[in-house]
Amino acid sequence: MVGELKSGAPLLRLRGVRKAFGNAQALRAADLEIAPGEVHALVGENGAGKSTLMSILGGSLSPDSGEMEFLGAPFRPVHPREAGNLGVSLVHQELALAPDLDVEANICLGREKSRLGFVLPQTARVREVLSWLGYGRLDPKARVGDLGVAERQIVEIARALFHDARLILMDEPTSSLPAADAESLFAMIARLKARGVSVVYISHFLEEVARVADRITVLRDGETVAAGLPAETPVRDILAAMVGRPVAEIFPSSPRNIGDTLLDVRAWVCGTGAAPASFSLRRGQILGLAGLVGSGRSSLLRSLAGLRPHSSGQAIWAKTAETMADSQGRARAEPGKRIGFLSEDRKEEGLALNLSVRANAALADLNRFRGPAGLLRLGAEAEAVRAVCAKLRVRYRHLDQPVGALSGGNQQKVALSRLLLGDSEVWLLDEPTRGVDVGAKAEIYALVSRAAAEGKAVLWAGSHLPELFGMCDSLAVMHRGNMSPVKPVGLWSESEVMAWATSGSGGKA
């Protein structure tokens, strides 16, 4: 440790921290102050500088200028290991673990004890840390690559405690967690706080911030623009500080007329042990599909999109009475059928990150840009992509910029642009706002609401209940491949949704 604190002194103090990458100023004047045993939320849009600031604190980047103090002494780590030795650990959104090593090896990484060249086991100490976190059941000898996302996150946090962290930086810790595991994380954060460990908590979910944080700091364009107590700061004020303008009701209230049925799904079965699912998708309708991770909601969407086979049932286009499946039970979702699918994992399968904005958007339907000789009409393609990106307010430098260089929210809007360019009548959206900031979420909500108002039918699968309740007309819940009855969203309560999601019944949670 670098020192002991005087009574009332902050654990961490940053003043005027700046960091540039070439001509791009990631941090302009970042200020932050963390008290001992405090949970401090850091919020802002994608590109506001949150991750850059966390990388500086975690030792992965060095600031260009500014003052940093930790435990009352100057703080400027030049390597993550040095930051860890000083008492600061970063839990990445994309977990930084060695999947082929076991739990114990990952937790002890960098703090191994050896004798005569042999690494000594520290199983008892590892079990102690895991038990304190409430995960004593986790086997230290289990291969990390075989664990679920929640358990891998526990391994990262356990590693920080094993290394005697005084400050743990958590970057979007619940972005990939189901509700039950998120609750366990919140309880764990409370235990860390009681132990005197401070936490910097980055999240796009403002209701989580209000629940877990003692204080909040808002970054915008690399600057600290607001700080205060969540309990005394209305969400609309936090949003306004984040985006730099007043924010109206985040969920749009545009009127929609529910019209004719577009797709009638009858007794559809897409997994072993799943019960038949029957529902219809109508013009102007947004049908929500709630459920925990592994509930089968993603499998249902993927089978309807033609990405995996189903074992029985029919999906019938209402206007033509044509079934949407071939003889092998795989749904046909070619452009002519106007089915648009948005994957929950844009980095691995939703986008080709090394390709350009133009190429990613145009992949929806390249045939529309083919000339008489079969060659692509690049001018027409560029014009169409530019128009749809303007409609979605995608921020990019030029159409040939790699889509991987955009912020998460802009990447997601490029993925959504395919549904517009493909003229899809039915939109299958799997966690469409995962990993994007509040400002981008509001724009995606508005986009989907407009699409429904124009006569699209939307099936929205997600785990974030406020979002489903705010966006959907009707709702169903998945549990282990079984689907509840579809009801108007006003007839559901959050407790009833959770009861279905966790037990498969309609009893009160």
Image (cartoon, rainbow, N blue to C red):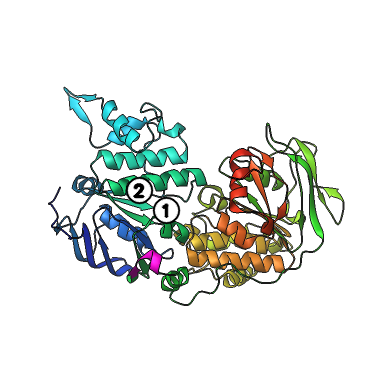
Q: Which portion, as a residue range, is magenta?
A: 227-232
Q: Residue furthest bottom?
A: 245
Which residue is found at the position 24% from the left and 40% from the top? 163
For label 2, the crowd category at 10 Å Cα-Cα, with few meaning under 14, some 14 to 19 and many 20 or more, is: some
Which residue is found at the position 63% from the left and 45% from the top? 297
Which x, y percent locates residue 310? 72, 38
Q: Is residue 310 above or below residue 286?
A: above
Q: Earlier in the sequence, mark 1 or mark 2?
A: 1
Tell me the distance, in whole angstroms, between the alpha carbons under discs 1 and 2.
17 Å
Q: Amino acid at mark 1?
A: Glu
Judge by depth and name the residue closer to the eye, 390 or 211: 211
Is residue 231 inside the magenta stretch?
yes
Instruction: For the residues labelled 1 and 2, say whether their Cβ atoms are less than 8 Å apart.
Output: no
Residue position marked by numbered label 2 in the rendering: 190
Judge by depth and name the residue closer to the eye, 102 or 100: 102
Q: Determine the secondary structure under disc 1.
A: loop
Q: Determine the secondary structure under disc 2.
A: helix
Q: How many marks?
A: 2
Camera sees residue 365: no
Residue position marked by numbered label 1 in the rendering: 172
For label 1, the crowd category at 10 Å Cα-Cα, with few meaning under 14, some 14 to 19 and many 20 or more, is: some
**Apparent side of residue 377 relative to residue 141 in the rendered image (left or right):** right
